Amino acid sequence: MKKKFMTKSLEDYLEAIHRQISKTGSARVVDVANILDVKMPSVNNAVKELAKLGLVKYERYREIQITEKGKQKAAAIYERHKLLKTFLLSIGVSEKNAETDACAMEHILSSETLGRLREITEERPDID
């Protein structure tokens, strides 16, 4: 049996679902499609994969429910995103580019690099 794993794309979907639920209390396929600027069939496919991984629960035409495991994974992804965006803003990157770049970087940086960035960010009181 082939082991399933989180791709960069699935991490983006999970993070979008988590952020939408945190913001409004619910997430629907159309909400996620709008957030990520993708078509609804793409969201449906991603949600099915996330459900196979035990990160969400979903029935067609119903709201997407995030599991406890999904919440933990999404929170970790979002924390990486916030750390990277904060760091990029602190070195003078524009808001727009910091958001875009943090989204790209959160998937590829090693835990060692993220750890060092966290240490540097925490050491500097002028970084929020």
Image (cartoon, rainbow, N blue to C red):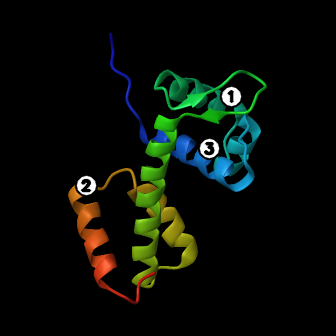
Q: Quadrant of residue 61?
A: top right
* Residue mark closest to the camera, 1 vs 3: 3
Amino acid marked by disc 3 = Ile
In this picture, residue 19 sits left or right of residue 101 = right
- Can you say whether 11 is above or below 120 in the image? above
Mark 1 / mark 2, whichever is N-terminal: 1
As drawn, the residue found furthest toward the bottom would be 126
How far across and how far down the image is residue 102, in percent?
A: 45, 63
The type of residue carrying mark 1 is Pro
Compare marks 2 and 3 and give the one earlier in the sequence.
Answer: 3
Mark 3 crowd level (few <14, some 14–19, many ≥20, 10 Å Cα): many
Q: Disc 2 and disc 3: Cα gap in Å?
A: 24 Å
Which element is circle 1 on? Answer: helix
| Residue that carries the numbered disc 2 in the rendered image | 111
> Label 2 is placed on what type of residue?
Ser
Write the residue at 43% across / 42% down: 8
**Crowd class of label 2 (few under 14; some 14 to 19; many from 20; radius 10 Å):** few
Q: Nearer the viewer, residue 47 or 45?
A: 47
Residue at the image position 67 percent from the left and 50 percent from the top? 20
**Residue 85: which disc?**
none
Query: Which x, y percent locates residue 1?
Result: 32, 9
Location of residue 86 in the rendering, given as x and y in whole percent from the top left corner: 45, 74
Q: Residue 17 bears which disc, if any?
A: 3
Q: Which of label 1 and label 2 is nearer to you?
A: 2
- The numbered dot on residue 41 is 1
Tell me which numbered mark, 1 or 3, is placed earlier along the sequence: 3
